[in-house]
């Protein structure tokens, strides 16, 4: 879907974003987007670690029960 976007299309999108949000709000928008991505990544890592720990505990319980 996005693989066909070239430089002209990206420049048009950038111009539209600047028109909508204004030059002064772009740094705040970028900061908020970056924080959101960082929070998402950390929550995914935490969830993966939790699931991994639970799987290890289940395997240990199964090994002890047999």
Image: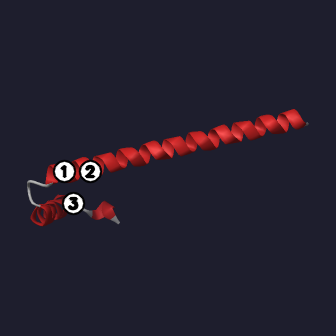
Q: Earlier in the sequence, mark 3 or mark 2?
A: 3
Query: From the viewer's perspective, is residue 31 above or below residue 60?
Result: below
In the image, taking residue 53 as reference, residue 1 lies left or right, namely: left
Q: Position of residue 38 (x, y in %)?
A: 36, 44
Q: Secondary structure at mark 2?
A: helix
Residue drawn at (35%, 66%) of the image = 1
Q: Earlier in the sequence, mark 1 or mark 3?
A: 3
Q: CA distance from mark 3 to mark 2?
A: 26 Å
Q: Position of residue 60 (x, y in %)?
A: 78, 34
Kindly report which numbered mark, 1 or 3, lies closer to the viewer in this rendering: 1
Q: Position of residue 27 (x, y in %)?
A: 16, 49
Q: Do the CB atoms of the residues marked 1 and 3 lie less than 8 Å apart?
A: no
Q: Position of residue 22 (x, y in %)?
A: 9, 60
Q: Do the CB atoms of the residues marked 2 and 1 lie less than 8 Å apart?
A: yes
Numbered circle sitting on residue 46: none
Q: Secondary structure at mark 3?
A: loop
Residue drawn at (77%, 38%) of the image = 59
For label 3, the residue is 6
Coloring applied to the structure: secondary structure
For label 2, the residue is 32
Residue drawn at (31%, 46%) of the image = 35
The C terminus sits in image quarter: top right
User: Mark 1: few, some, or many residues within 10 Å (few <14, many ≥20)?
Assistant: few
Q: CA distance from mark 2 to mark 1?
A: 6 Å
For label 1, the residue is 28
User: Mark 2: few, some, or many residues within 10 Å (few <14, many ≥20)?
Assistant: few
Q: CA distance from mark 1 to mark 3?
A: 26 Å
Q: Secondary structure at mark 1?
A: helix
Residue drawn at (49%, 46%) of the image = 44
């Amino acid at each position: 879907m996005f693989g066909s976007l070239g430089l002209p299309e990206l420049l048009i999108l950038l111009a539209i974003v600047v028109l909508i949000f204004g030059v002064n709000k772009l740094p705040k928008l970028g900061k908020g987007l970056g924080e959101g991505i960082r929070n998402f990544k950390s929550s995914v890592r935490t969830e993966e670690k939790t699931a991994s720990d639970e799987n290890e505990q289940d395997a240990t319980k199964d090994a002890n029960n047999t």
